[in-house]
Structure formats: C-alpha cells, structure tokens
Amino acid sequence: MNDGPIYIGGLDRSGKTTMQAFLASHPRIAIPYAGSNLWSFFYARYGDLSKEQNFERCLAALLSYSHAVALNPDPDRIRREFRQGPADYARLFALLHEHYAEQQGKPRWGDQSGLIETYAGHLFAADPSAKLIHMVRDPRDRYAASLARAPKGKGRAGGAAARWLYSARLAERNRRRFPDRYLVVRFETMVAQPEQTLRQVCDFLGEEYIPSMLTMDGSPRQRDKLARTAGRAPGTSPLSQDFIGGFRQSLSAGDIAFIQWAAGKKMSQYGYVLDPVAFSAAETLHFWLVNCPANLARMAAWRGREEAHNRLPALLGRRPD
C-alpha cells in the first residue's frame, strides 16, 4: 500500500469533484469535498516560513479561509508539528490535510485543487510518494458548463481556450517528467466507463479497487448534486453522458469555431473531434475581424495574469474570494 498524498488537478468543470467523490468513498482515502486551492492562494505569498512572523501571518490567513477552516484545523497542533519538519509551504499544507484524514479515520489524504498541476514539481519534491490525477475535459463542454454556472464570467471563449491549453500542456509536460506519478484522465472516459476508470486509478494509486466507490457514499453532497443535475432518482448512478457534447446546444457558432481554431491541434491529441462550423460570408468576416481578435486579446490577457500570479505571488498572487 502507498500512503503518499493524492492530488486531483485540472480546470474547473472538468470532473475533479466527481473524482474526489469516487476516491473519498474508498475506506483508506480522505479528500475534502471542496477544493482547497492552498497552493494557488497561499504558496510563497508570505516569504520564508522559517521566520516566525511570516509563518504566523500565513497561518492566520489560512485560518480565515473557508476551505481551510472546513478541514477543522487545530492551530496549536499545527504550530507544534510544523516546527518538527521542514519549514516550508508544502509541509504546512500537508499538515492540514493529514489532520483532516486522521479525523476521518483514514490513513491516506488527498486534495483536489484547480490548476494544482502548475506546482507538480514542488509537490513531488516535497513528497516523492505523491501521486497526481489530472482531469481533462473537452474545452467546448468545459466552457459551456462554466458559462452555465457564471454567465457573466470573465475571459469568455478566449480566456477559456487559454486556460485549457495551459492545463493540457502542463498535463503532457508533467506526464513526461513524472511518468510513474502522474495520470491523465479524460472526463468523458470517467463518465462513460466509471468502473474501468476507477480500476485504472486505483492501480495507479496502489490501492485495492472497492466496488462501493461507485456509489459515492463518501461524498454525498457531490453524489446528490450530480443526481439532481442529471435528473436521476436517488439510489441510481448519478453519472450522465447527457452533457457530453452539450456545447452544441449552448455555445454560439463563433465560440465553437474560435476554441477549435485556437486549440484544435491539442484537442485532437486528446481524442476530441472537431465539429464543422458553417458561416455565411458576413459571419466569416465578423469572425476574423471582430470575434477572433477580441478572443486572442483575452487569451493574451489570461496568460499574462497567470504568469504574474506564478512569478510574483507575494505581490500579484491570487486571492481567495
């Protein structure tokens, strides 16, 4: 058995929480329902944690963040145990999850966080026994699902394409660098073949496959949410393939065309088939003169912000809502 930490990464609306629901239903694995995003929000923001003042500032910020509070942290225990190991961010974040797993009566902890693949090198350096599962979804469906949740979301199709390409390229790079510790799972495969997918995931994690994982009883909030969304009766499988390809009913032809134009080559590498998009002469002109330039600008803006977040976290890092 491998007791190393389990990370679930990828973009929002890509199946991370569904994978969490499956794995949290394993008798040995504890993964909280809400993504912690500790690395995205707190890594390197407070300087050297070996300095007491910096550590206390970081801990105070963590204790005011709802997703960290949901782990039911014990500040005094964290302070005591933090001093017994490396004085770094990986150690601090791990303590919160270790304590949570202990409260759940399980020996192995996990964390699902958006874009945690950005920090793969740091995760594996901190703990060589760690494993990372990277969820990937058709960028058109992912964008459609994102719009359904936040119709006025920033970035639009350009931002969505930039995010997807960034994550997909990290998946390839990290899989080459850490082949035994990194697994890429397509959302569509997980939904269409859940048992086969979970058997593969358990084999990757060094865990026994437990059929009851399919019931998601370890994460009832996600199970019931999926069942409601899919219109399924309680007690039946909450998974539905109805949302695969649903972008055709919700995205404009211009958005579909742009995402396919910007990310089509990478989409094909992941097995996503491009749709033909028919434009009139006027629509073609609008696409190339208006839609495309605007979305390219949004792509560039997103990439610039992401670069700033990663290079200057103390000054320009992401902040929790």
Image (spheres, rainbow, N blue to C red):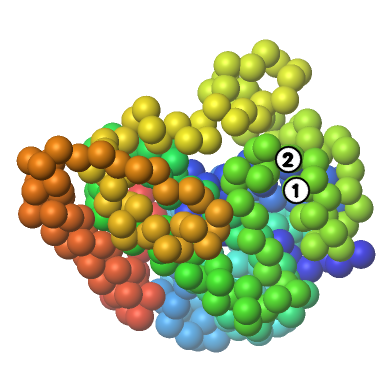
| Amino acid residing under circle 1 | Thr
Per the image, label 2 sits on a secondary structure element best described as loop
* Camera-side residue of 38 and 259: 259
**Residue beneath disc 1:** 197
Identify the residue under disc 2.
193
Q: Amino acid at mark 2?
A: Gln
Measured as percent of width and height from the top left, residue 68 is found at: 55, 53
At which x and y percent is residue 204? 80, 62
Residue in view at x 67 percent, y 13 percent: 233
Question: On the image, which quarter does residue 200 sit in?
Answer: bottom right
Q: Is residue 39 visible?
A: no
The crowding category of the residue bearing disc 2, from other C-alpha atoms within 10 Å (few below 14, some 14 to 19, many at least 20), is few
Q: Is residue 248 left or right of residue 1?
A: left
Residue, x 37% and y 60% (percent of image)?
263
Q: In the image, what residue occupies the spot 51% across and 50% down?
A: 272
Q: Quadrant of the image for the N terminus?
A: bottom right
- How many numbered discs sit on the rendered protein? 2
Q: Residue at x 57, y 22 (%)?
A: 230
312 w.r.t. 230: above or below:
below
Mark 1 lies on a secondary structure that is helix
Distance, label 1 to label 2, CA atoms, is 6 Å
Q: Give yes or no for contact between labels 1 and 2 (Cβ–Cβ under 8 Å).
A: yes
